[in-house]
Image (tube, rainbow, N blue to C red):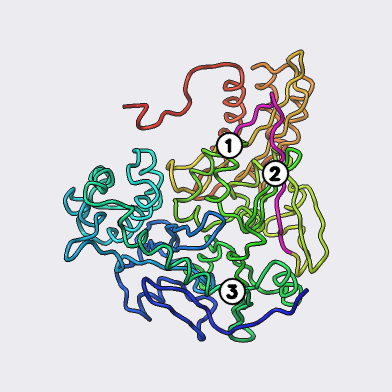
Amino acid sequence: MAEIKIRSEIRFILNGSDVALTDVAPDVTLLDWLRLNRTLRGTKEGCAEGDCGACTVLVGKLSTDGLVYESVNACIRFMGSLDCTHIVTVEHLRGDGEKLHPVQQAMVDFHGSQCGFCTPGFVMSLYGLWMKAPNPSNGTIEKALQGNLCRCTGYEAIMRAAHAISSYGKAAKDPLAVERKNIIARLEALRDGARVDIGSAKARLIVPANADDFADIFENEPKATIVAGSTDVGLWVTKHMRDISPVIFIGGIGDLRSMSEADGVITIGAGVTYTEAFKTLSKRIPALGPLFDRIGGEQVRNMGTIGGNVANGSPIGDTPPPLIALGARLTLRKGKVRRTIPLETFFIAYGKQDRQPGEFVESVHVPVPAKGTKFAVYKVTKRRDEDITATLGAFNLALAKDGTVADIRIAYGGMAATPKRAAAVEKALIGKPWTEATVEAAMAKYANDFSPLTDMRATAEYRALAAKNLLLRFYIETTGTKAPFQVSRDEAA
């Protein structure tokens, strides 16, 4: 490996100014830094866990698609993850002359704000949307605002404001569009291919230069905390006050942010975010599209990674059950050594995964379902959007020509200490005719596979019943019913 240059500062653009930080703690959040160090207090703290969106800012980053601006939660975004990015806060918005920015003026004219605490976050989410879709549909607006909560106005006024923004100005003439070439040039100048290494011992912050550099660092610092999107680790700091030092930030490593497909298998780098993966996965495996739309809000999907969701081993992570049902495999790396294992074997027990010290998740390999295969994912939550799973079921069915079950893989989250297959249920179905009687008989086997717990999200009894009913729903949906199980707001209207 070529010698890696090392620099001891994080470099980025804040609104219009270049910033270089040589003294920054590994656990300091962008929200705290903006408010306390730069007195930019338009960015608010509401929940400090990436739920309410009051802290929303835009972060621009260079990618294969050019310069991309995404809404993110500043309350759980660490400063160490911002090297070579452009941070845009609500203070940077401006209209022509003394006028308000079009997004701000639309919010004023359509009464989209009352107490005003959440308003800067809504404005920034709408700003990011407007730059990408100047004339959005209701569904597009709702998706962009899933991660923004308001306790005063109700959302209809904000929806009306979102539709009206382009009547106040053109997105192509917005400063972020006009100044795009200049910002790209400045960001490219910041990308020097160096490793960032700040502090020492328990106060050390590292941003590897590339994947090989990361592998070398982690092999020598196996107790370091790896941070990709920080949608989980951020709460370790803001809610649990945990010490996460030293920290290795990998979200900006281009080697880990690629996707490819070969021989019917999609390979996803560990640093690929939900947003980045959505286009490919929702097209190649359509059932994953609606699931991804319900993972957190837009800000969380822009930050969170599939590799991180797998690596942290949570029993209620949304991606492991469908990936297990699809027969996904996992590539782990330690130094220069790689090994590939079935994803389902990675999860050993609660909080324990098949990962050696200094070893990390490098990529996930997801088979595209064969033609004729029936695949579905169902997520059960208390509220539809931006909620943590109570239970989630994934089903992958292949029928023989005579209508019997040739193969079926069923996996659940929220039903055990790890994401887990329903082996006894599968055994009761394979070789049997795919009929309601067969399914109802197999439902009795759930007790052999799962003993769910009661917690704040659901009781054990509810989870057990819901899991069975998800199998029944899958049966009904795969046998030709035309009755909708899910109706959108637009369809209901």
| Mark 2 closeness class: few <14, some 14–19, many ≥20 residues within 10 Å | some
Mark 1 or 3, closer to the camera: 1
The spot of residue 8 in percent (x, y) is 58, 85
Gap in Å between the C-alphas at discs 1 and 3?
37 Å
Work out whether 84 lies above or below 480: below
Check residue 110 for magenta coloring: no
The residue beneath circle 1 is: 283
Disc sitting over residue 244 in the figure: 3
User: Amino acid under label 1?
Assistant: Lys
Can you say which quadrant of the picture contains the C terminus? top left
Q: Residue at x 32, y 62 (%)?
A: 175
Q: Nearer the viewer, residue 319 or 151?
A: 319
The mark that comes first in sequence, 2 or 1, is 2
Q: Secondary structure at mark 1?
A: helix
Residue 48 found in image quarter: bottom left
Q: Residue at x 72, y 52 (%)?
A: 347
- What residue appears at the point 48 percent right and 76 percent down from the top-left corner? 28
Q: For the point 48% across and 26% down, which residue is it? A: 485
Q: Is residue 367 magenta?
A: yes
The residue that mark 2 highlights is: 261
Image spot of residue 270 (x, y percent): 66, 57
- Mark 3–mark 2 Cα distance, whole angstroms, equals 35 Å
Left or right: residue 404 versus residue 113 is right
The magenta stretch spans which residues? 360-377
| Mark earlier in primary sequence (1, 3) | 3
Kindly give the residue lying farthest to the top in the view shown. 402
Q: Is residue 164 above or below residue 305?
A: above
